[in-house]
Image (spheres, rainbow, N blue to C red):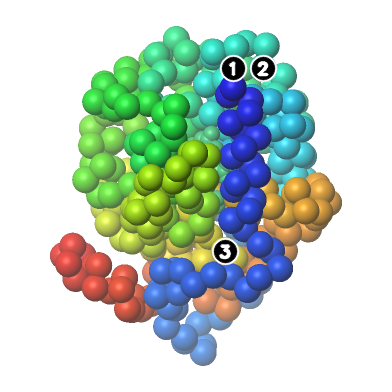
Amino acid sequence: MTGNRKDEHVALATAQHSPEQPPAPSQFDEVRFLHHALAGTDRAHVSLRTGFAGVEWPVPLYINAMTGGSERTGEINRDLAIAARETGLPIATGSLSPYLKDPSTAGTFTPVRREHPDGFVMANLNANATPDQARRAIDLVEADALQIHLNTVQETVMPEGDRSFGHWPAAIEAIAAAVEVPVIVKEVGFGLSGRTVERLASLGVRAADVAGRGGTNFARIENGRRARPDYGYLDDWGLSTPAALLDARGHGLPLLASGGVRHPLDAARALALGAHAVGASGGFLTVLLDGGVAALVRHITDWLDQLTALMTMLGAHRPAELADCDVLVTGSLRAFCHDRGID
Ligand code: FNR
Protein backbone atom coordinates (compact mmCIF):
# COMPACT_ATOMS: atom_id res chain seq x y z
CA MET A 1 0.00 0.00 0.00
CA THR A 2 2.70 2.46 1.06
CA GLY A 3 4.91 1.36 -1.87
CA ASN A 4 2.07 2.07 -4.29
CA ARG A 5 1.51 5.48 -2.72
CA LYS A 6 5.20 6.33 -3.17
CA ASP A 7 5.06 5.33 -6.85
CA GLU A 8 1.89 7.42 -7.31
CA HIS A 9 3.54 10.44 -5.65
CA VAL A 10 6.45 10.22 -8.11
CA ALA A 11 4.11 10.00 -11.12
CA LEU A 12 1.80 12.81 -9.95
CA ALA A 13 4.67 15.08 -8.83
CA THR A 14 6.62 14.81 -12.08
CA ALA A 15 3.42 15.56 -14.03
CA GLN A 16 3.52 19.00 -12.33
CA HIS A 17 7.00 19.80 -13.69
CA SER A 18 7.73 20.23 -17.37
CA PRO A 19 11.34 21.00 -18.26
CA GLU A 20 10.25 21.97 -21.81
CA GLN A 21 7.91 24.77 -20.71
CA PRO A 22 9.13 28.23 -19.68
CA PRO A 23 9.06 28.59 -15.87
CA ALA A 24 5.56 29.25 -14.50
CA PRO A 25 4.97 32.65 -12.87
CA SER A 26 5.90 32.70 -9.19
CA GLN A 27 5.98 35.07 -6.23
CA PHE A 28 9.77 34.76 -6.57
CA ASP A 29 9.31 37.11 -9.59
CA GLU A 30 8.32 39.81 -7.10
CA VAL A 31 11.79 39.70 -5.52
CA ARG A 32 14.12 41.83 -7.67
CA PHE A 33 17.77 42.62 -7.12
CA LEU A 34 18.43 46.33 -7.55
CA HIS A 35 21.04 46.53 -10.30
CA HIS A 36 24.32 48.16 -9.31
CA ALA A 37 26.60 48.24 -12.35
CA LEU A 38 29.81 48.48 -10.33
CA ALA A 39 28.96 45.86 -7.69
CA GLY A 40 30.64 42.92 -9.44
CA THR A 41 33.60 41.00 -8.06
CA ASP A 42 36.04 38.39 -9.44
CA ARG A 43 34.74 34.86 -9.91
CA ALA A 44 37.96 33.48 -8.41
CA HIS A 45 37.02 35.11 -5.11
CA VAL A 46 33.52 33.62 -4.95
CA SER A 47 32.92 30.52 -2.82
CA LEU A 48 29.65 28.61 -2.56
CA ARG A 49 30.41 27.29 0.94
CA THR A 50 27.68 27.83 3.49
CA GLY A 51 26.86 26.87 7.06
CA PHE A 52 24.15 26.95 9.73
CA ALA A 53 23.60 25.34 13.16
CA GLY A 54 27.16 24.01 13.25
CA VAL A 55 26.73 22.35 9.83
CA GLU A 56 29.16 23.13 6.97
CA TRP A 57 28.11 22.50 3.36
CA PRO A 58 30.27 22.91 0.23
CA VAL A 59 27.33 24.35 -1.71
CA PRO A 60 24.10 26.16 -0.76
CA LEU A 61 21.96 23.73 -2.75
CA TYR A 62 20.56 20.32 -1.71
CA ILE A 63 18.33 17.57 -3.01
CA ASN A 64 15.32 17.64 -0.73
CA ALA A 65 13.33 14.73 0.66
CA MET A 66 11.38 12.66 -1.83
CA THR A 67 11.09 8.96 -1.81
CA GLY A 68 11.78 5.33 -0.91
CA GLY A 69 9.66 2.34 0.09
CA SER A 70 9.13 0.59 -3.26
CA GLU A 71 11.52 -1.07 -5.70
CA ARG A 72 11.21 1.75 -8.24
CA THR A 73 11.70 4.50 -5.66
CA GLY A 74 14.76 2.65 -4.33
CA GLU A 75 16.30 2.99 -7.80
CA ILE A 76 15.38 6.67 -7.80
CA ASN A 77 17.08 7.15 -4.42
CA ARG A 78 20.20 5.45 -5.80
CA ASP A 79 20.28 7.73 -8.85
CA LEU A 80 19.58 10.91 -6.85
CA ALA A 81 22.45 9.98 -4.51
CA ILE A 82 24.83 9.40 -7.42
CA ALA A 83 23.95 12.85 -8.79
CA ALA A 84 24.44 14.35 -5.30
CA ARG A 85 27.84 12.68 -4.99
CA GLU A 86 28.99 13.83 -8.44
CA THR A 87 28.04 17.45 -7.68
CA GLY A 88 28.81 17.59 -3.94
CA LEU A 89 25.21 18.27 -2.92
CA PRO A 90 23.73 17.28 0.44
CA ILE A 91 20.70 15.01 0.05
CA ALA A 92 17.69 13.96 2.11
CA THR A 93 16.00 10.57 1.92
CA GLY A 94 12.24 10.46 1.53
CA SER A 95 10.19 9.76 4.64
CA LEU A 96 11.55 6.64 6.35
CA SER A 97 8.15 5.72 7.77
CA PRO A 98 7.80 2.83 5.26
CA TYR A 99 11.01 1.39 6.78
CA LEU A 100 9.69 1.81 10.33
CA LYS A 101 6.50 -0.05 9.35
CA ASP A 102 8.27 -2.70 7.28
CA PRO A 103 12.03 -3.13 7.79
CA SER A 104 12.26 -5.17 4.57
CA THR A 105 12.11 -1.82 2.69
CA ALA A 106 15.48 -0.77 4.18
CA GLY A 107 17.25 -1.48 0.88
CA THR A 108 15.21 1.21 -0.87
CA PHE A 109 16.76 3.89 1.40
CA THR A 110 20.30 2.63 2.09
CA PRO A 111 21.55 3.43 -1.46
CA VAL A 112 21.45 7.11 -0.45
CA ARG A 113 24.34 6.55 1.98
CA ARG A 114 26.03 3.80 -0.07
CA GLU A 115 26.30 6.01 -3.19
CA HIS A 116 27.22 9.17 -1.28
CA PRO A 117 29.53 7.80 1.45
CA ASP A 118 31.24 11.09 2.29
CA GLY A 119 28.26 13.36 1.62
CA PHE A 120 25.87 15.10 3.96
CA VAL A 121 22.80 12.86 4.25
CA MET A 122 19.56 13.80 6.01
CA ALA A 123 17.05 11.20 7.18
CA ASN A 124 13.40 12.24 6.91
CA LEU A 125 10.46 11.35 9.14
CA ASN A 126 7.03 12.63 10.09
CA ALA A 127 6.21 14.14 13.48
CA ASN A 128 4.46 10.98 14.71
CA ALA A 129 7.81 9.26 15.27
CA THR A 130 9.10 8.28 18.70
CA PRO A 131 12.69 9.05 19.74
CA ASP A 132 13.53 5.37 19.29
CA GLN A 133 12.14 5.35 15.74
CA ALA A 134 14.07 8.54 14.98
CA ARG A 135 17.30 6.87 16.12
CA ARG A 136 16.58 3.83 13.93
CA ALA A 137 15.96 6.06 10.91
CA ILE A 138 19.16 8.03 11.52
CA ASP A 139 21.19 4.84 12.01
CA LEU A 140 19.89 3.21 8.82
CA VAL A 141 21.45 5.85 6.55
CA GLU A 142 24.10 7.11 9.01
CA ALA A 143 22.41 10.47 8.75
CA ASP A 144 24.21 13.72 9.55
CA ALA A 145 20.91 15.46 10.35
CA LEU A 146 17.26 14.54 10.78
CA GLN A 147 14.47 16.26 8.87
CA ILE A 148 10.99 16.12 10.40
CA HIS A 149 8.24 17.10 7.98
CA LEU A 150 5.00 18.87 8.92
CA ASN A 151 2.23 18.16 6.44
CA THR A 152 -1.22 18.80 7.90
CA VAL A 153 -2.63 19.87 4.52
CA GLN A 154 -1.30 16.80 2.72
CA GLU A 155 -2.60 14.42 5.42
CA THR A 156 -6.01 16.12 5.35
CA VAL A 157 -6.43 15.71 1.61
CA MET A 158 -4.82 12.23 1.53
CA PRO A 159 -7.65 9.67 1.61
CA GLU A 160 -5.77 7.43 4.08
CA GLY A 161 -4.08 10.38 5.85
CA ASP A 162 -3.60 11.09 9.57
CA ARG A 163 -6.27 13.13 11.35
CA SER A 164 -4.47 13.80 14.67
CA PHE A 165 -1.81 16.48 14.78
CA GLY A 166 -2.04 17.86 18.33
CA HIS A 167 0.79 15.69 19.67
CA TRP A 168 3.36 16.90 17.12
CA PRO A 169 5.05 19.64 19.20
CA ALA A 170 5.69 17.23 22.11
CA ALA A 171 6.93 14.54 19.72
CA ILE A 172 9.33 16.97 18.03
CA GLU A 173 10.64 18.14 21.40
CA ALA A 174 11.22 14.55 22.55
CA ILE A 175 13.07 13.65 19.34
CA ALA A 176 15.21 16.80 19.41
CA ALA A 177 16.25 16.02 22.98
CA ALA A 178 17.04 12.38 22.22
CA VAL A 179 19.00 12.34 18.96
CA GLU A 180 22.62 13.36 18.51
CA VAL A 181 22.30 14.97 15.09
CA PRO A 182 20.69 18.39 14.45
CA VAL A 183 16.95 18.32 13.82
CA ILE A 184 15.64 20.37 10.90
CA VAL A 185 11.87 20.79 10.60
CA LYS A 186 10.36 21.33 7.16
CA GLU A 187 6.98 21.69 5.50
CA VAL A 188 6.24 19.81 2.27
CA GLY A 189 5.15 22.77 0.14
CA PHE A 190 2.78 24.92 2.23
CA GLY A 191 5.38 27.05 4.04
CA LEU A 192 6.39 27.70 7.66
CA SER A 193 5.25 30.97 9.23
CA GLY A 194 7.21 33.10 11.69
CA ARG A 195 4.94 31.91 14.49
CA THR A 196 5.66 28.27 13.62
CA VAL A 197 9.41 28.86 13.47
CA GLU A 198 9.35 30.57 16.86
CA ARG A 199 7.55 27.56 18.33
CA LEU A 200 10.04 25.17 16.71
CA ALA A 201 12.95 27.12 18.23
CA SER A 202 11.42 26.57 21.68
CA LEU A 203 11.23 22.80 21.01
CA GLY A 204 14.97 22.33 20.51
CA VAL A 205 14.91 22.29 16.70
CA ARG A 206 18.14 23.61 15.12
CA ALA A 207 16.96 24.88 11.71
CA ALA A 208 13.76 25.27 9.66
CA ASP A 209 13.21 24.61 5.94
CA VAL A 210 10.25 26.82 5.01
CA ALA A 211 9.33 24.53 2.05
CA GLY A 212 6.70 26.87 0.66
CA ARG A 213 4.05 26.94 -2.06
CA GLY A 214 5.00 27.47 -5.68
CA GLY A 215 6.48 24.14 -6.76
CA THR A 216 5.35 20.59 -6.13
CA ASN A 217 1.80 20.85 -4.78
CA PHE A 218 0.75 18.05 -2.44
CA ALA A 219 -2.84 19.25 -2.22
CA ARG A 220 -3.12 18.65 -5.97
CA ILE A 221 -1.23 15.36 -5.72
CA GLU A 222 -3.52 13.99 -3.01
CA ASN A 223 -6.62 15.39 -4.70
CA GLY A 224 -5.43 13.45 -7.76
CA ARG A 225 -5.39 10.25 -5.67
CA ARG A 226 -8.98 10.67 -4.41
CA ALA A 227 -11.95 9.12 -6.14
CA ARG A 228 -13.56 12.57 -5.95
CA PRO A 229 -11.28 15.62 -5.59
CA ASP A 230 -13.37 17.11 -2.76
CA TYR A 231 -10.57 19.34 -1.54
CA GLY A 232 -9.78 21.09 -4.85
CA TYR A 233 -10.23 24.45 -3.10
CA LEU A 234 -7.05 23.78 -1.09
CA ASP A 235 -4.90 23.79 -4.24
CA ASP A 236 -3.54 27.26 -3.52
CA TRP A 237 -3.31 26.95 0.28
CA GLY A 238 -0.19 28.07 2.08
CA LEU A 239 2.63 30.56 2.10
CA SER A 240 4.80 30.86 -0.99
CA THR A 241 8.49 30.25 -0.37
CA PRO A 242 9.50 33.94 -0.53
CA ALA A 243 6.54 34.93 1.69
CA ALA A 244 7.46 32.23 4.23
CA LEU A 245 11.09 33.41 4.26
CA LEU A 246 10.02 37.00 4.85
CA ASP A 247 7.60 35.95 7.59
CA ALA A 248 9.94 33.48 9.31
CA ARG A 249 13.23 35.32 9.35
CA GLY A 250 14.31 36.76 12.67
CA HIS A 251 12.22 34.22 14.61
CA GLY A 252 15.06 32.34 16.28
CA LEU A 253 16.18 29.69 13.79
CA PRO A 254 18.48 29.57 10.76
CA LEU A 255 16.34 29.10 7.66
CA LEU A 256 16.62 26.89 4.61
CA ALA A 257 14.38 27.45 1.59
CA SER A 258 12.66 25.03 -0.74
CA GLY A 259 9.46 24.89 -2.75
CA GLY A 260 9.24 26.12 -6.32
CA VAL A 261 12.86 27.15 -6.79
CA ARG A 262 12.78 27.22 -10.59
CA HIS A 263 16.30 28.27 -11.52
CA PRO A 264 19.55 29.69 -10.09
CA LEU A 265 18.08 33.22 -9.88
CA ASP A 266 15.33 31.93 -7.55
CA ALA A 267 18.07 30.27 -5.49
CA ALA A 268 19.92 33.61 -5.29
CA ARG A 269 16.66 35.36 -4.34
CA ALA A 270 16.02 32.87 -1.52
CA LEU A 271 19.58 33.33 -0.24
CA ALA A 272 19.10 37.11 -0.42
CA LEU A 273 15.95 36.76 1.72
CA GLY A 274 18.04 35.07 4.40
CA ALA A 275 18.11 31.35 3.59
CA HIS A 276 21.42 29.58 4.22
CA ALA A 277 20.77 26.99 1.51
CA VAL A 278 18.14 26.12 -1.06
CA GLY A 279 16.53 22.75 -1.72
CA ALA A 280 14.91 21.33 -4.85
CA SER A 281 12.83 18.19 -5.30
CA GLY A 282 10.22 17.79 -8.04
CA GLY A 283 12.17 19.65 -10.75
CA PHE A 284 15.32 17.60 -10.17
CA LEU A 285 13.29 14.38 -10.07
CA THR A 286 11.72 15.22 -13.43
CA VAL A 287 15.12 15.87 -15.01
CA LEU A 288 16.33 12.51 -13.64
CA LEU A 289 13.34 10.55 -14.92
CA ASP A 290 13.45 12.27 -18.33
CA GLY A 291 17.18 12.10 -18.98
CA GLY A 292 18.87 9.82 -16.44
CA VAL A 293 21.63 10.50 -13.94
CA ALA A 294 23.93 12.17 -16.49
CA ALA A 295 21.22 14.74 -17.30
CA LEU A 296 20.66 15.51 -13.62
CA VAL A 297 24.42 15.89 -13.00
CA ARG A 298 24.60 18.32 -15.95
CA HIS A 299 21.55 20.20 -14.69
CA ILE A 300 22.91 20.62 -11.15
CA THR A 301 26.38 21.52 -12.44
CA ASP A 302 24.78 24.25 -14.58
CA TRP A 303 22.87 25.56 -11.54
CA LEU A 304 26.04 25.74 -9.43
CA ASP A 305 27.94 27.40 -12.28
CA GLN A 306 25.19 29.98 -12.85
CA LEU A 307 24.72 30.65 -9.15
CA THR A 308 28.45 31.40 -8.94
CA ALA A 309 28.11 33.69 -11.96
CA LEU A 310 25.16 35.57 -10.39
CA MET A 311 27.07 35.99 -7.13
CA THR A 312 30.05 37.34 -9.11
CA MET A 313 27.75 39.84 -10.87
CA LEU A 314 26.15 40.87 -7.56
CA GLY A 315 29.47 41.09 -5.66
CA ALA A 316 28.64 38.36 -3.11
CA HIS A 317 31.75 36.38 -2.12
CA ARG A 318 29.74 33.90 -0.02
CA PRO A 319 26.07 32.90 -0.20
CA ALA A 320 25.45 34.75 3.07
CA GLU A 321 26.63 38.00 1.46
CA LEU A 322 23.63 37.87 -0.91
CA ALA A 323 21.60 38.97 2.11
CA ASP A 324 23.48 42.31 1.95
CA CYS A 325 22.30 43.00 -1.63
CA ASP A 326 19.61 45.61 -2.24
CA VAL A 327 16.42 43.73 -2.99
CA LEU A 328 13.08 45.20 -4.06
CA VAL A 329 9.94 43.37 -2.97
CA THR A 330 7.05 44.23 -5.28
CA GLY A 331 3.42 43.37 -6.07
CA SER A 332 1.48 40.90 -3.93
CA LEU A 333 4.57 40.04 -1.88
CA ARG A 334 4.95 43.69 -0.94
CA ALA A 335 1.28 43.78 0.10
CA PHE A 336 1.87 40.64 2.18
CA CYS A 337 4.80 42.32 3.97
CA HIS A 338 2.66 45.38 4.61
CA ASP A 339 -0.20 43.31 6.05
CA ARG A 340 2.18 41.32 8.26
CA GLY A 341 4.08 44.40 9.45
CA ILE A 342 7.35 43.19 7.89
CA ASP A 343 9.88 45.94 6.99
C1 FNR B 1 8.30 15.17 -1.71
N1 FNR B 1 8.45 15.90 -0.53
C2 FNR B 1 8.63 15.22 0.66
N2 FNR B 1 8.98 15.92 1.79
C3 FNR B 1 9.24 15.25 2.94
O1 FNR B 1 9.60 15.91 3.92
N3 FNR B 1 9.14 13.89 3.01
C4 FNR B 1 8.78 13.15 1.92
O2 FNR B 1 8.73 11.92 1.99
C5 FNR B 1 8.49 13.81 0.70
N4 FNR B 1 8.10 13.13 -0.41
C6 FNR B 1 8.08 13.77 -1.64
C7 FNR B 1 7.91 13.04 -2.80
C8 FNR B 1 8.00 13.66 -4.04
C9 FNR B 1 7.85 12.83 -5.29
C10 FNR B 1 8.26 15.05 -4.11
C11 FNR B 1 8.39 15.76 -5.44
C12 FNR B 1 8.37 15.80 -2.97
C13 FNR B 1 8.41 17.39 -0.53
C14 FNR B 1 9.74 18.01 -0.88
O3 FNR B 1 10.76 17.67 0.03
C15 FNR B 1 9.62 19.55 -0.96
O4 FNR B 1 9.35 20.08 0.33
C16 FNR B 1 8.53 20.01 -1.91
O5 FNR B 1 8.43 19.13 -2.97
C17 FNR B 1 8.77 21.39 -2.48
O6 FNR B 1 9.92 21.41 -3.30
P1 FNR B 1 9.87 21.41 -4.91
O7 FNR B 1 9.44 20.06 -5.35
O8 FNR B 1 8.90 22.47 -5.30
O9 FNR B 1 11.30 21.69 -5.32
Helix, strand or loop for disc 2: helix
Asked if disc 3 and disc 1 are in contact, CB closer than 8 Å, the reply is no
Would the CB of label 3 be found within 8 Å of ligand 1?
no
* Residue 124 appears left or right of 149: right
**Foreground of the two, 89 or 164:** 164
- Quote the CA–CA distance across marks 1 and 2: 5 Å
In x, y percent, where is residue 248?
29, 52
**Disc nearest the viewer among 3 and 2:** 2
**Disc 1 designates what residue?**
99
Residue assigned mark 2: 105
Q: Are marks 1 and 2 in contact (CB under 8 Å)?
A: yes
Q: Residues within 10 Å of mark 2 (few under 14, many from 20)?
A: many
Checking the image for residue 262, the label placed there is 3
The three-letter amino acid code for the residue at tag 2 is Thr
Could you give the CA–CA distance between mark 3 and mark 1, rounded to whole angstroms? 31 Å
Residue at the spot 52% in from the left edge and 76% down from the top edge:
314
Asked if residue 270 is positioned above or below residue 208 in the image, the reply reads below
Residue 225 versus residue 332 in the image, above or below = above
Check residue 33 in the rendering and tell me which mark sits there, or answer none: none
Question: Residue 306: x, y in percent?
Answer: 66, 69
Q: Are marks 3 and 2 in contact (CB under 8 Å)?
A: no
Question: Is 6 on the left-hand or right-hand side of 181?
Answer: right
Q: As shown in the figure, which amino acid type bears the numbered disc 1?
A: Tyr
Sequence-wise, the earlier of marks 1 and 2 is: 1
Residue placed most toward the observer, 43 or 71 = 71
**The residue under label 3 is which amino acid type?**
Arg
